[in-house]
Each structure stands twice: as structure tokens, then as C-alpha cells.
């Protein structure tokens, strides 16, 4: 009798542990999504643009980013736009910060973009914005 009771209680405990784990995972993913929405839209646009490898596709995405329209923010889609001047200012700020700052003085989103490969992509992006949109 004791063994059966112990087994049932253990099964119930494991079931509730799985339920709690699922709820905590859902809360974590929701919190991460909400924190991403707090990042300035220009930084989100830059992060998207530097992931594009093809220069023509990148130029097309830049044109889309500079075309005013309805801004939509969803789970899978973010239709954001900005001005060339604002985007150029953010790119210049990140690149200048890379060359001038000391460790630990940056916001986390900017620090994530500060590695040499990303800086090279940002410098190319900065040149493209200057040539085509300013």
C-alpha cells in the first residue's frame, strides 16, 4: 500500500513539475519578446540589415526601411521605417563607439554588435546610406 501511494504521489509531482516548467518557459519567451520591443527601431533595422549578405537585397531593404508606411510590429513581422539621417546617426554612433569606448560603458544591444565582423558590415552599410540616401 505504501509503495502504491508513493508511486502515485511521485507521478502527480512529476506531472506538476512539467506543467510549471511549461508555464515558466512561456513566461520567459514572452519576456524576451517584450524586451526586444524596447530596443530602438533603428537598432532593430540595423541588426536586420547586417544579416543580409547580398548587396542588392540590402539596398532594397534599405529603400524599404526609408519608405514611410504603416509600422507593424508582430510576432513574426516588423515593418519599421526611419529616415536616412537617423539610421546614419545610429550606425555612426555604433562604429565610433567601437573605436573610442572602453569595455562596460555600452548598453547591451550596442555591445552585442561590437565585434570586428559586424563593424565592417556597419561601415559598408554606412557608406551605402551616405552614397544613396544622403
Image: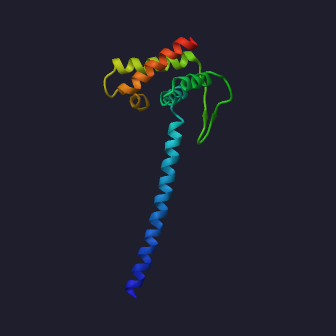
Residue 73 image position (x, y, % from top left): 61, 36
Relative to residue 38, is residue 13 depicted above or below?
Answer: below
Left or right of residue 49, residue 118 in this image: left
Residue 124 image position (x, y, % from top left): 45, 19
In this orientation, which residue lies closer to the viewer: 18 or 126?
126
Picture quadrant where residue 3 is located:
bottom left
- Using the rendered image of the protein, determine whether residue 34 is visible from the camera's viewpoint: yes
Task: Give me the residue at 53% from left, 20% from top.
Answer: 87
Task: Give me the residue at 65% from left, 30% from top.
Answer: 71
Task: Give the colour scheme of this rendering.
Answer: rainbow
Question: Residue lying farthest bottom?
Answer: 1
Task: Give me the residue at 43% from left, 69% from top.
Answer: 14
Left or right of residue 65, residue 95 in this image: left
In this orientation, which residue lies closer to the viewer: 26 or 50?
50
Q: Quadrant of the C terminus?
A: top right
In this orientation, which residue lies closer to the viewer: 67 or 104?
67
Question: Residue lying farthest left?
Answer: 102
Question: Residue lying farthest right?
Answer: 70
Residue 67 image position (x, y, % from top left): 65, 22
Q: How many marks?
A: 0
Relative to residue 25, is residue 40 depicted above or below?
Answer: above
Task: Give me the residue at 39% from left, 17% from top.
Answer: 96
In this orientation, which residue lies closer to the viewer: 54 or 117?
54
Residue 36 image position (x, y, % from top left): 51, 37
Q: Quadrant of the N terminus?
A: bottom left
- Using the rendered image of the protein, determine whether residue 106 is visible from the camera's viewpoint: no
Amino acid at each position: 500500500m505504501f509503495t502504491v501511494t508513493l508511486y502515485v504521489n511521485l507521478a502527480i509531482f512529476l506531472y506538476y513539475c512539467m506543467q510549471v516548467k511549461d508555464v515558466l518557459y512561456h513566461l520567459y519567451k514572452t519576456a524576451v519578446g517584450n524586451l526586444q520591443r524596447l530596443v530602438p527601431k533603428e537598432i532593430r533595422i540595423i541588426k536586420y540589415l547586417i544579416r543580409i549578405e547580398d548587396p542588392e537585397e540590402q539596398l532594397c531593404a534599405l529603400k524599404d526601411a526609408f519608405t514611410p508606411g504603416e509600422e507593424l510590429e508582430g510576432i513574426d513581422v516588423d515593418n519599421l521605417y526611419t529616415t536616412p539621417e537617423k539610421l546614419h546617426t545610429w550606425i555612426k554612433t555604433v562604429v565610433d563607439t567601437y573605436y573610442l569606448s572602453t569595455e562596460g560603458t555600452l548598453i547591451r544591444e550596442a555591445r552585442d554588435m561590437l565585434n570586428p565582423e559586424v563593424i565592417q558590415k556597419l561601415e559598408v552599410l554606412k557608406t551605402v546610406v551616405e552614397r544613396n540616401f544622403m
